[in-house]
Image (spheres, rainbow, N blue to C red):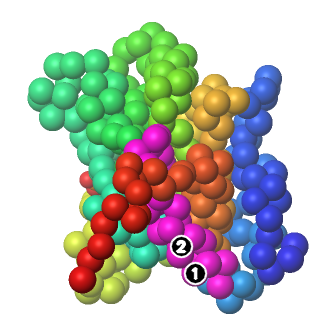
Amino acid sequence: MSSQPSYDEIRALTMADPKAKKSVSLKDYPTRGDKVFESKKDAMASLEEDALAINELQDALFAGKAGALLVVLQGIDTAGKDGTTKECFKYTSPLGVHVHAFGRPTEIELAHDYLWRIHAAAPRKGYIAVFNRSHYEDVLVVKVRNLAPSKLVEQRYEQINRFEKHLIENGTRVLKLMLHISKEEQGQRLKERLEVPSKRWKFNPSDLEDRKLWPDYQDAYETLLQRCSTAWAPWHVVPADSRSRRDAIAARLIRQELEMMDPKYPDPGYRLEQYKID
Ligand code: ADP
């Protein structure tokens, strides 16, 4: 592929088919990303260009307040949800981007339906919200660890599809990125967390518990990719073994989503000749 792959090429490689009738297999999606960017240098150049463009588009989005963008990031521990956010929005004003990390629900959150806390964090018009984990945890960890009755979990796929449609019909575009890494790469990154002093704080022994459940998590991801990749909010499976390629692919998808929104600066509501500044 060329050093600057087009959006269509990236989309073709990453998008989970919204019409998939049979189950999706994650094995069909690469984890390396070298088919998109041959070299890390190409990926870094592309990221640079797209991160700058994202800043400009966000500025117009903020000024025009005509719509909002929600970026949903999911991925197994160490897949790089934090790093992707940092890189894609490195040139974007923090005033216009809100990042929400969803951890284990609090008592009050558990007393509501599972979408309550999610809807409350959805972006206002003019803003970009990034969800680091999301409502999809309610069909991932909750399913794998049996934290809710399976009958309730089963109903959630359709509820989530309807919820996302509701957001879209009310002016919020939804871009969903699953960061896809191999088990070997996760092993390397967990080791790195133990070995590098500045990364030790990120290590959580429960990550090892989840690693033991790897096949169950992969199954749960395959199910949600099949059932929640919709025509209005398709899932993209982003190869995430290489950090630079992952960030470049995510940035290209975010930039394109913003370009499709076509944000415009508003009419200022006055005539320039009305004012003279000396
Ligand atoms: P991260 O691993 O994303 O850096 P944390 O270490 O705070 O952040 O982990 C967040 C934890 O919260 C994860 O183990 C995740 O599975 C869990 N979590 C998120 N949403 C839910 C949920 N709805 N129900 C139960 N656990 C959840």
| 166 versus 60 height, above or below | above
Q: Is residue 42 visible?
A: yes
Q: What element carries label 2?
A: helix
Tell me which residue sits at (28%, 62%) in the image: 95
Q: Is residue 246 left or right of residue 72?
A: right
Residue 30 horizontal/vertical position (percent): 74, 60
Q: Residue furthest right?
A: 1
Q: Which mark is residue 207?
A: none
Q: Which mark is residue 51?
A: 2
Tell me which residue sits at (60%, 60%) in the image: 255
Q: Can residue 215 be seen in this view?
A: no
Residue 67 horizontal/vertical position (percent): 46, 40
| Amino acid type assigned to the residue bearing label 1 in the image | Glu
The stretch of residues the image draws in magenta is 45-72
| 79 versus 276 height, above or below | above
Q: Is residue 201 left or right of residue 52?
A: left
Circles 2 and 1: CB distance less than 8 Å? yes
Which quadrant: the N terminus?
bottom right
Q: Which mark is residue 48?
A: 1
Count residues near mark 1 (Cα–Cα under 10 Å), then give few for <14, some for 14-19, many for 20+: some
Residue 266 horizontal/vertical position (percent): 45, 51
Q: Which of 82 and 76 is in front in this view?
A: 82
Q: Residue furthest left?
A: 107
| Amino acid type assigned to the residue bearing label 2 in the image | Ala
Count of labels in the image? 2
Q: Distance between the residues labelled 2 and 1?
A: 5 Å
Count residues near mark 2 (Cα–Cα under 10 Å), then give few for <14, some for 14-19, many for 20+: many
| 144 versus 62 height, above or below | above
